[in-house]
């Protein structure tokens, strides 16, 4: 005896199966694309982390250089009167050199 609930629904079932297969294929392609995107994001994050680690070591070395310079400068300022004269001459020369370079650069641009 035939199933009373499946009368004339064979075409509808086939259509629903085809639609389900199509949706499953679309979902599989979207999952594949999402997986590829997640992989790219992970790869980019690793590259940026390594770049930041490199910057960290560069900043540490710059901090070490600046600390040494400040210590030498402090030692020079605390030392005798002759070093203070040299410090004044170097400071004045730096200011004059800055204004001279500024004047030359503005003159060249015009």
Image (tube, rainbow, N blue to C red):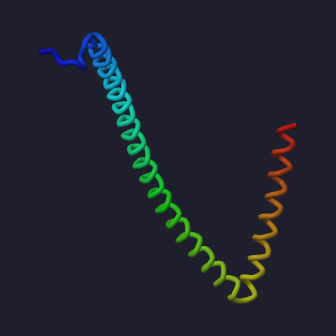
The answer to whether residue 56 is left or right of residue 82 is left
Residue 2 appears at what percent x and percent y? 15, 15
Residue 26 appears at what percent x and percent y? 36, 24
Residue 73, picture quadrant = bottom right
Q: Residue at x 61, y 79 (%)?
A: 72
Q: How many marks?
A: 0
Q: Quadrant of the N terminus?
A: top left
Residue 33 appears at what percent x and percent y? 38, 31
The answer to whether residue 78 is left or right of residue 96 is left
Q: Residue furthest left?
A: 1
The vertical placement of 68 against 38, above or below, is below
The foreground one among 88 and 29 is 29
The foreground one among 69 and 12 is 12
The vertical placement of 101 against 3, above or below, is below
The answer to whether residue 7 is left or right of residue 98 is left
Residue 15 appears at what percent x and percent y? 31, 14
Q: Residue at x 74, y 76 (%)?
A: 87
Q: Quadrant of the C terminus?
A: top right
Residue 5, picture quadrant = top left
Q: Residue at x 39, y 45 (%)?
A: 42
Q: Residue at x 74, y 84 (%)?
A: 82
Residue 29, picture quadrant = top left
């Amino acid at each position: 005896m035939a199933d009373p609930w499946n009368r004339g629904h064979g075409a509808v079932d086939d259509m629903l199966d085809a639609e389900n297969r199509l949706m499953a294929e679309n979902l599989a392609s979207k999952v594949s694309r999402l997986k590829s995107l997640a992989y790219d994001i992970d790869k980019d994050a690793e590259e940026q982390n390594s770049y930041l680690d490199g910057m960290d070591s560069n900043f540490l070395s710059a901090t070490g250089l600046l600390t040494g310079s400040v210590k030498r400068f402090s030692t020079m300022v605390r030392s005798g009167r002759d070093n203070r004269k040299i410090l004044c001459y170097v400071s004045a020369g730096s200011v004059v050199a800055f204004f001279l370079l500024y004047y030359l650069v503005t003159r060249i641009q015009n």
